[in-house]
Amino acid sequence: MSAVNANPLSLSLSLLLALAASVAPAPAWAQSRPALQPLPPAPPPLNAEGQPAPVPGLAPLPGTAPAPAPRPRGGGGGGGGGGHDCLVEPSLLVSVGSPVDGVLNEVLADRGDTVRKGQRLAQLQAGVEAAAVDLAEARVQYGRRKVARNEGLYQKQLISAQDKDEMETEARVHEEELKRDRENLKLRSIVSPLDGVVVERKLGGGDLVRADKSIVMKLAQLDPLHVEVVLPSEQYGAVRVGMNGRVNLSPLVSGSHSARVTVVDRVIDAASGTFGVRLQLDNPGYKIPAGIRCSVRFGG
């Protein structure tokens, strides 16, 4: 009977304690805590030009221009003449060095100079090689005189055929040694392998040249030039080797110039969906510089 009467009292105390806790003031640390502020709105996404990109279903933000339409791959107005963007490059770039080790005695060409094929560009010190050539020439001359003197003796049967053969063979060996020494002397001269211009000179007189890694200068062949174009895969088959194209080089070079397709890549780049095309552009007198942007139209 006493246990039954205790239940209402316990419930009353629990209710009083809960009511006191609900009306009690917050502690000091909770009252001094600043109220939470709402997060700022996220910035709108930007396109490649730095402008806010349009969100599907929403109007553009006030004061912003609409995003430009995407540029088609391989097209454009490079050079100001429409057509496909292209780049003019040298038909050949060569790093000129030496096949032998040595010390440069002099360099005869500098950056910007026009050079011809076979022209001497630099000279290595070649005192030892030149002396070897002089010695070989002296041996050859002596061997020829010796063979001529003994020819009469052989006709008179004063020397044997074996002696005559040995002298002639010795003279022939000296002649071949002279050829070898002359070729070694040629290796001390660095000559141009093409008609073109000097792009860069890396070494000068007194520098050590290593045959395995030293580059004396770089040359570029500017006639003809190569025009490199990248086209979308949709145009594969429309451009063929042998086709003509009109290359516009404005504003650096006025007018359009005829070029011929020489290479069409047979492998399409899967990542970009493009393939490369090369045209050959004649450049007599080097009037067109390499390294400029252009535009090309095919079938012109």
Image (cartoon, rainbow, N blue to C red):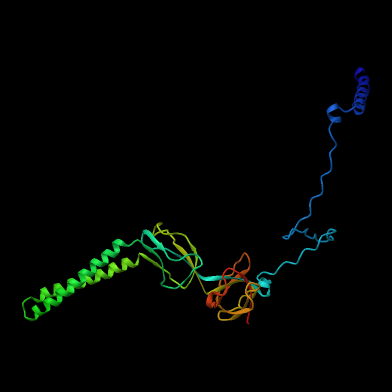
Measuring from the top left, give residue 154's x and y in whole percent: 9, 78
Please name whichever residue, 3 or 300, is drawn nearer the observer in this view of the structure.
300
Residue at screen point 91% across, 29% down: 22
In this image, 134 relative to 79: left or right? Answer: left
In this image, 246 relative to 187: left or right? Answer: right
In this image, 128 relative to 168: left or right? Answer: right
In this image, 90 relative to 152: left or right? Answer: right
Quarter location, residue 128: bottom left
Residue at screen point 58% across, 68% down: 291
Residue at screen point 77% across, 63% down: 67
Residue at screen point 69% across, 70% down: 72
- Residue 235 appears anywhere in the view: yes
Measuring from the top left, give residue 28's x and y in whole percent: 85, 27
- Residue 231 appears anywhere in the view: no
Picture layout, residue 181 above or below residue 5: below
Measuring from the top left, give residue 86's x and y in whole percent: 62, 71
Quarter location, residue 106: bottom left
Quarter containing the N terminus: top right
